[in-house]
Image (cartoon, grey):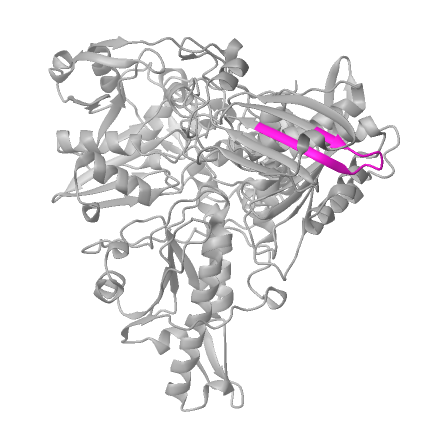
């Protein structure tokens, strides 16, 4: 066959998949494994110009054909440039398949409308839900058919040399910064007291003689593009030019300790650190410039990486100021950061530099990585959830050539030269299991009510009780209702993956985790190895959404690598991802309220079973309140999910507020505003309503909902209509405010993505199970949002420069489900209190 314009000959079994041949034999990792059943489109390639799923096509079937992978476009195609310009990606894992499908579309139809785009692209899943930007990018590519080719992507920032000991475990004066980074100036900002219980280890940066500033943070980027926003903040306050600033993230050997990337804490925590670190760095550059030029510091300014003497315009670059230096500065007194109202670099729409790598296939995800001599690992799975291993016989598997088989407690795993051999080795293992009885899906609501526990299995704390006033004695009209939500799956497009390598008694693990330091600790505990001898490196994963917190894949890879004496990579199958990952918790929520005739809440009782306490407190004024979170025994493994329990708690609260408003005959928006205590939330409600035309909606069926979470404020307005017995979404407007806006482009992308991801849980996502088995564990059976599900979406960004920036990865998801439910009621008069709604 011809691959990317060059003749290639592939021997071996002609029945093996084209995807595996491209990746493993030709090294073309731009084609991504996603589902193995042709449902997600991540592996799309062009065969004689037609988009085909490489996971479902055999090598023999394309013999004699011309195959084009994303690498074959070489950054020259208009679609690639348009995807970069429009920011049509988040984690980027789906992007190669998306680009190739769009290329084929424009070959057939040079000016497609939205319907044609949706029809062509509907087979490609973007789990980050960047669909509106993808539409915009395809229109852009059609408008500008011959743009200049993309410049090569800058090399991904990394630290090639390993320090003698992890810097977070070493006092600052004893760290080998300069042996690892070279000469220059290192500025260390020590950690402050943990805020809200979220500990971090400060921040540091290195200014090199080339003028480059490299910042270090233990946060990771799982597609939310906190990398760009944090880089903007460091550039802004350090006075450096944005292209000269880069960020090393999630490398436990060289980055400050961080508790993990979750809870929308990147901006709130590390954003503040980057601003302070930058402000001190700028002050140091001015001081060094004053010494070099022999002038008072007050006569100097610093911008674009240059210190200038204002009276004479003499200038000296940051790189020149640190030439020959090997100096460590620890921040003692921090100058105030620059006010957001005067930002020059921050506050502007900025594309992620790494987006070029995504559209060319150059970006390497955890499942793409290889090491010399690497083996492929696989884990023996129990016959059902909750099954306990009684005994196991590894002899047949161990006897297979090249196979290493291990047992460590409940873990049984193998490593082999290739994936097919590893799978055959698993089949050769003889194991006996004890399978306890399992709760049935049909009995889930009753089970959660009647099986309370002391603490939630997901790790977000124990029970919660808040009471003020006398809920039972409060006057007014009373209303009560129960709302429910099922388990739903994270379903990241890249499944869990880890690559482990031992060298000289020290371990390195590359894995797509949201908690690199917790993963290091878990590895140390499991392997009885000093944490100082373990390095966890996090390449950007193909999505996370709260689902990649745990360390079991990394531990399994490390155990196999130690036993085999060679590097081992484990990549979960799609079936494993659905069956053995944890889920967003199911929920049962009882709400009781009382309201006066003039539309003032007098009592509010809210009890959540199982889901969690996030978003449980109401922003609405009620003199009497009783709020409870009751953890419950969960039939399925559960854990963090985007916005945790805030989504289902907002669904119940905002649905109930709508019910009360209709019962009183008061406009639902007016009822909310009448009872709101939070003026910032009231402002986003008004912004969404104004953009949506709420006041003049007339007979149009619209619903509205909103809330406060992670210090962000969101309000979503949805318009629907009923047609042929089904509900059609016509339009979504989401207004969002999270303080000062650092990167409007990234923020808009996050709001769009979260809103659309929330569509899945609102409309159709639900995990079905019986007898310890997941019944819909594939993309063919578990429906996630696709581009054809997405109506026009408008995002209103409310900027508050006087308020420190907060995150946006989670909060925008919480209002979409109740807004749709309320719109369905407006269209049909039917009140739906259980998710999914359709």
User: Does the stretch in magenta take in 603?
Assistant: yes
Quarter holding the N terminus is: top left
Q: Quadrant of residue 508?
A: top left
Residue 365 point in image, percent of width and height: 37, 38
Q: Position of residue 456 (x, y in %)?
A: 43, 29
Q: Bounds of the magenta span?
A: 593-607
- Looking at this view, is 709 or 139 the one in front? 709
- Residue 207 horizontal side relative to residue 414, left or right: right
Where is residue 25 drawn, in percent x and y? Answer: 29, 29
Between 17 and 308, which is closer to the camera in this rendering? 308
| Residue in view at x 32 percent, y 54 percent | 255
Q: Magenta stretch mostly in which secondary structure?
A: strand
Task: State the residue at coordinates (50%, 50%).
Answer: 352
Looking at the image, residue 614 lies above or below residue 412: below
Which quadrant holds the C terminus? top right
Judge whether residue 206 is colored magenta: no
Count of numbered badges drawn on the protein: 0
Q: Can see residue 216?
A: yes
The residue sitting at 56% across, 42% down in the picture is 83
User: Which percent across, then down, holds residue 181?
Assistant: 27, 62
Viewer-closest of 678 and 252: 678
């Amino acid at each position: 066959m011809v691959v990317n314009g060059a003749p290639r000959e592939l021997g071996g079994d002609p029945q093996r998949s084209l995807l595996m041949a491209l990746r493993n034999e030709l090294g073309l990792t731009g084609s991504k494994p996603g589902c193995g059943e042709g449902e997600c489109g991540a592996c799309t390639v062009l065969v004689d110009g037609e988009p085909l799923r490489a996971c479902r096509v055999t090598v023999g079937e394309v013999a004699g054909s011309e195959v084009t992978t994303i690498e074959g476009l070489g950054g020259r195609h208009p679609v690639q440039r348009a995807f970069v310009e429009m920011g049509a990606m988040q984690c980027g894992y789906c992007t190669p398949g998306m680009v190739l499908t769009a290329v084929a579309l424009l070959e057939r139809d040079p000016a497609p409308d939205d319907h044609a785009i949706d029809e062509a692209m509907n087979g490609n899943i973007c789990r980050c839900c960047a669909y509106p930007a993808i539409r915009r990018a395809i229109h852009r590519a059609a408008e500008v058919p011959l743009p200049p080719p993309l410049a090569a992507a800058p090399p991904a920032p990394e630290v090639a040399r390993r320090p003698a000991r992890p810097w977070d475990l070493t006092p600052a004066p004893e760290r080998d910064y300069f042996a690892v980074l070279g000469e220059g100036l290192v500025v260390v900002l020590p950690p402050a007291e943990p805020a809200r219980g979220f500990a971090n280890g400060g921040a540091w940066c290195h200014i090199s003689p080339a003028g480059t500033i490299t910042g270090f943070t233990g946060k990771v980027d799982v597609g939310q593009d906190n990398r760009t926003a944090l880089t903007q903040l460091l550039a802004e306050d350090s006075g450096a030019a944005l292209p000269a600033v880069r960020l090393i993230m999630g490398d436990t050997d060289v980055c400050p300790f961080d508790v993990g990337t979750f809870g929308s804490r990147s901006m709130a925590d590390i954003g503040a650190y980057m601003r302070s670190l930058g402000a001190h760095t700028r002050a140091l550059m001015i001081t060094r410039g004053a010494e070099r030029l022999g002038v008072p510091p007050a006569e100097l300014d610093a911008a674009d990486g240059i210190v200038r003497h204002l009276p004479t315009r003499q200038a000296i670059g940051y790189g020149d100021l640190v030439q020959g230096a090997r100096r460590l500065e620890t921040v003692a007194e921090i100058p105030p950061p620059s006010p957001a109202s005067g930002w020059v670099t921050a506050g502007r729409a900025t594309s992620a530099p790494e987006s070029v790598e995504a559209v060319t296939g150059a970006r390497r995800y955890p499942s793409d990585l290889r090491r010399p001599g690497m083996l492929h690992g696989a884990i023996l799975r129990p016959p059902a959830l909750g099954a306990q291993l009684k005994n196991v016989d590894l002899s047949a598997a161990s006897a297979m050539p090249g196979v290493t088989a291990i047992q460590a407690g409940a873990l049984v795993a193998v490593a082999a030269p290739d994936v097919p051999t590893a799978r055959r080795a698993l089949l050769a293992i003889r194991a006996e299991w004890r399978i306890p009885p399992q709760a049935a899906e049909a009995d889930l609501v009753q089970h959660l009510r009647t099986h309370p526990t002391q603490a939630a299995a997901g790790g977000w704390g124990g029970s919660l009780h808040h009471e003020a006033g006398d809920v039972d004695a409060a006057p007014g009209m009373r209303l009560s209702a129960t709302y429910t939500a099922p388990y739903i799956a994270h379903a990241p497009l890249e499944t869990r993956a880890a690559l482990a390598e031992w060298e000289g008694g020290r371990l390195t693990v590359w894995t797509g985790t949201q908690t690199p330091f917790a993963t290091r600790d878990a590895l140390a505990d499991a392997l009885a190895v000093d944490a100082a001898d373990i390095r966890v490196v996090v390449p950007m994963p193909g999505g996370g959404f709260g689902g990649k917190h745990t360390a079991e894949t990394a531990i399994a890879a490390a155990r196999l690598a130690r036993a085999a004496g060679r590097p081992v990579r484990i990549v979960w199958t799609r079936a494993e991802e659905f069956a053995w990952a944890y889920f967003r918790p199911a929920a049962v929520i009882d709400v009781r309220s009382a309201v006066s005739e003039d539309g003032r809440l007098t009592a509010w009782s809210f009890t959540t079973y199982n889901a969690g306490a996030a978003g449980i407190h109401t922003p609405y004024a009620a003199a009497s309140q009783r709020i409870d979170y009751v953890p419950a025994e969960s039939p399925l493994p559960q854990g963090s999910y985007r916005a945790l329990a805030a989504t289902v708690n907002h669904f119940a609260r905002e649905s109930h507020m709508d019910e009360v408003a209709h019962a009183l005959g008061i406009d639902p928006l007016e009822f909310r505003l009448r009872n709101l205590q939070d003026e910032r939330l009231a402002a986003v409600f008004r912004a969404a309503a104004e953009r949506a035309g709420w006041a003049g909606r007339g007979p149009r069926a619209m619903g509205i909902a909103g809330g406060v979470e992670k210090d962000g404020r969101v309000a979503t307005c949805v318009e629907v209509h009923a047609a042929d017995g089904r509900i059609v979404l016509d339009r979504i407007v989401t207004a969002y405010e999270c303080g000062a806006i650092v990167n409007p482009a990234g923020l808009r992308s996050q709001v769009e993505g979260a809103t659309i991801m929330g569509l899945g849980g609102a409309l159709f996502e639900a995990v079905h199970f019986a007898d310890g088995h997941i019944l819909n564990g594939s993309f063919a059976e578990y429906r996630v949002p696709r581009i054809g599900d997405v109506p026009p979406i408008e995002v209103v960004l409310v900027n508050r420069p006087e308020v420190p920036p907060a995150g946006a990865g989670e909060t925008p998801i919480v209002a979409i489900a109740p807004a749709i439910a309320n719109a369905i009621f407006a269209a049909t008069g039917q009140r739906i209190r259980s998710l999914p709604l359709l």
